[in-house]
Image: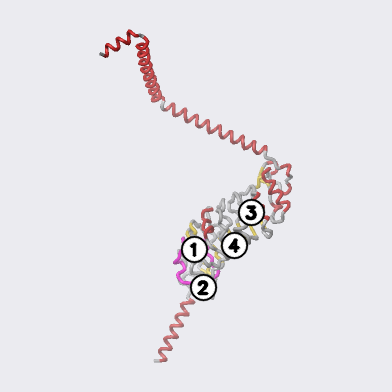
Amino acid sequence: MKCASGMTRLLLLLALALSCRCCPDKCLCTSETVKCQNQGLVKIPPSLPAKTKSLFVTGNRIAEINDSSFPTRLENLAEMYLSGNEMEDVLAGAFKNLPNLVQLDLSNNIIQNFSESAFPDDSKLQFLNLSRSLNNYTTLDFFVHANLPNLTSLDLSNNDLLFLPDGMFKGLPSLTTLNLRNSSLIMFQSVDENEALLALRHLDLRDNHLKNLPAATMVDFGLRLDLRVQLAGNPWRCNCFISDLLAWLKNSTQVVDARELTCADPEAVRDRPLLQVQQSQLKCSSDMEGVLETSYVFLGLVLALIGVIFLLVLYLNRKGIKRWMYNIRDACRDHMEGYHYRYEINSDPRLANLSINSDV
């Protein structure tokens, strides 16, 4: 009996060990790595080995991840790559069972909804890649309320953001690297040094649609002496409004690619390195005249179009307008005849007495 009992326990332990080492279907596994790549999966494999440290689930069709995507707690999982999955939704509790996740790659997806509760409150995440995954800046709203105290690197490159939501960095006190390259930004606003980005060391703003930087932003950059900024590839408008930026570039070493910045307009300085432009060349009068001339032409076209539409309406309703005018004329004529009759009565006492007698 003791032998049988011991054998049973041994078999149970063996079965448990095998279950811990099993590799999910359509995946390749090593001792600490699981790769499920380009297999047409529609969800995360449910039975991942407990010792997994690195998980690659890329090139599939996983539309969303939620609180049931990782049903068992994976204490050892530190790196996860979920790029190229056509993913649209990252829902609440998606990573709650991944307490030691340090690096997460969600690039090359089409994320529309990212819950602020996707990560646990004590998240250890340090590296987050959202490159080529966001269609507009509203998707970034989850950063405003998300708590990612250990995040040091955030990649938002190659997205269509236009703007960054106010307060999105307040929950990222440890952020040192922010990549916003080629994200269609038309402006980059300053942030309060007392609230966010105190630890920022590397900021990539290359290849956006920036034409100038607000003076407050440059002052804010100057307060972070260790910060290094990249600004090349933007269509800088070299008029009088850019003089502050030019002065900053000439007196600061924070912009590491300052020599690569070139003017996009006006025509007189197009393609010229910004550092080679003289203050005397930064003019606004001709630019403003051009803008005003364009505005006047546009206004004239709008007024002309309104006039044409008005005349067309009058023409289409000409019969009704004619009847309306006749009715107004007849009404006015009747009113005037009545007024004239009463005037004659009041001015001639005989007619007045006659009118009174007729009433009696």
For marks 4 and 1 on the same chain, the one whose residue lies earlier in the sequence: 1
Tell whether label 1 touches label 2 (CB within 8 Å): no
Asked if 9 appears above or below 232 in the picture, the reply is below
Q: In the displayed orientation, state which residue is furthest to the top.
A: 350
User: Which one is in front in this view, the residue at disc 1 or the one at disc 3?
Assistant: 1
Residue 195 image position (x, y, % from top left)? 59, 58
In this view, the mark in front (4 or 1): 4
Give the residue number, with chain letter if any, for mark 3.
206
Q: Which residues are magenta?
A: 61-85
Disc 4 marks a residue whose amino acid type is Pro
Dominant secondary structure, magenta = loop
How crowded pointer 3 is (Cα within 10 Å; few <14, some 14-19, many 20+) is rated as many
Distance from the alpha carbon under mark 2 to that under mark 3? 38 Å
CA gap between label 1 and label 3 equals: 30 Å
Give the mark, 2 or 4, whose residue is nearer the N terminus: 2
Which amino acid type corresponds to the residue marked 1 in the rendered image? Ala
- Label drawn at residue 75: 2
Q: Residue at x 69, y 52 (%)?
A: 260
Residue at label 1? Answer: 118
Q: Specify whether residue 65 is painted magenta.
A: yes
Q: Position of residue 47 (x, y in %)?
A: 46, 72
Q: Is residue 37 visible?
A: no
